[in-house]
Amino acid sequence: MLNFILKRIGYGLLVLFGVITLVFFLFNILPGDSARMMLGQRADEKSVEIIKKDLGLDKPLYIQYLCYLNDLSPISFHSLNPESAVFLDKDKYSFSTIVKTQNNSLVIKKPYLRRSYQSKRQVSEILSEAFPNTIILAVVSMSFALIVGVLLGSLSAIFNGSWFDKINLSVIVLGMSLPSFFAAIIFAWLFAFILAPYTGLSMFGSLYAVDDLGQGQYLDLKNLILPAFTLGIRPLAVISELTKSSLLDTLSQDYIRTARAKGLVKYKVIKNHALKNSMNPVITSVSGWFASLMAGAVFVEYIFDWKGVGVVIVDGLEKYDFPVVMGALLVICVLLVIINIVVDILYGVLDPRVRVMG
């Protein structure tokens, strides 16, 4: 089991390294001068040169790449020479020295995602404010999709071919055919505009709302309903169909027939035997759909004005604030790698054959 876990962690680190490399070179070959973007109308040649030197943009691209990896790595190599590309700047971040020589240091620190071109704030600070809202939205959406999807899929398998199964199939087809951005517009118009007097929902709003009396912010959970429902529709449809197909396949196995022949009630057979052994495809689907939720959240958050990472990414792209966009993409990637590793481990626990194959 330990070997299986170490392999999954190794694969995850390779994926993360590939994403870091892709993101860096993608955003560094885009047109535009980052130094001039930061200075705006105040840009002159001398100021541009100073900013480029401060950001390390005056170095060759491969040196910039190595410096970027050095900034992201928790264990980093630094030079004590101010002229070095990896000069140990105490104003960048806090660190603890592991090994120190006359001219160099090996330090341990938090990954440094650099600073915003526009606000000059650290990217990690900006993302730490936005990501909790996105995580809450994604977790609530996936929880809704998982619970309702497994329930509907199980009922469809039990009553296979009935009117309930046909209605559920229609819901699955409708859910799969609705892209998140289109569903967000439809649901916002229907439930927060046309039916607003009955639902009490708003088209725009985040997890915290500003009190009209000037008494600060308060938790407004109703603003979570429409974004979570919108994001959860598609994974719900997939989970429901997967649960039904897998459960029907499991119910046809010999050991299920044996359990029934022993006189076990159908409900207990499904609950104690069939359902557990039918969850592997569903668990795999959850990890993949969580990635889709994080991507789809960009559009949904923007439409509902949910103050999460989606709004941050769109705002960063509009303003050419590349460090913010790069940092957001990397954090999303880290979360997805961790989720996939955890899901693979759970998959291995549920089905020992996976550990042998992996």
Image (spheres, helix red, strand yellow):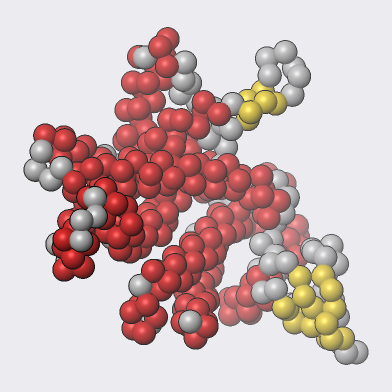
Q: Position of residue 275 (x, y in %)?
A: 30, 56
Quick check: can you spot residue 140? yes
Instruction: Pick out the residue farthest to the top.
Output: 197
Q: Position of residue 208 (x, y in %)?
A: 63, 30
Instruction: Pick out the residue farthest to the front.
Output: 263
Instruction: Pick out the residue farthest to the right.
Output: 102
| Residue situated in front as seen by the camera: 180 or 162 | 162
The picture quadrant where one finds residue 82 is: bottom right
Residue shown at the point (49%, 47%) measured from the top left: 139
Instruction: Pick out the residue farthest to the bottom.
Output: 101
Residue 31 higher or lower than 231, as above or below:
below
Q: Is residue 338 left or right of residue 121?
A: left
Residue 132 higher or lower than 90, as above or below:
above
Residue shown at the point (32%, 34%) measured from the top left: 183
Residue shown at the point (67%, 74%) measured from the top left: 73
| Residue situated in front as seen by the camera: 38 or 191 | 191
| Residue situated in front as seen by the camera: 54 or 208 | 208
Residue 221 higher or lower than 80, as above or below:
above
The picture quadrant where one finds residue 186 is: top left
What is the tally of numbered marks visible in this picture?
Answer: 0
| Residue situated in front as seen by the camera: 333 or 101 | 333
Q: Position of residue 105 (x, y in %)?
A: 83, 83
Quick check: can you spot residue 234? no
Residue 65 higher or lower than 297, as above or below:
below
Q: Position of residue 153 (x, y in %)?
A: 25, 46
The picture quadrant where one finds residue 327 is: bottom right
Residue shown at the point (56%, 55%) measured from the top left: 328
Indicate the quadrant containing the C terminus: top left, top right, bottom left or bottom right. bottom left
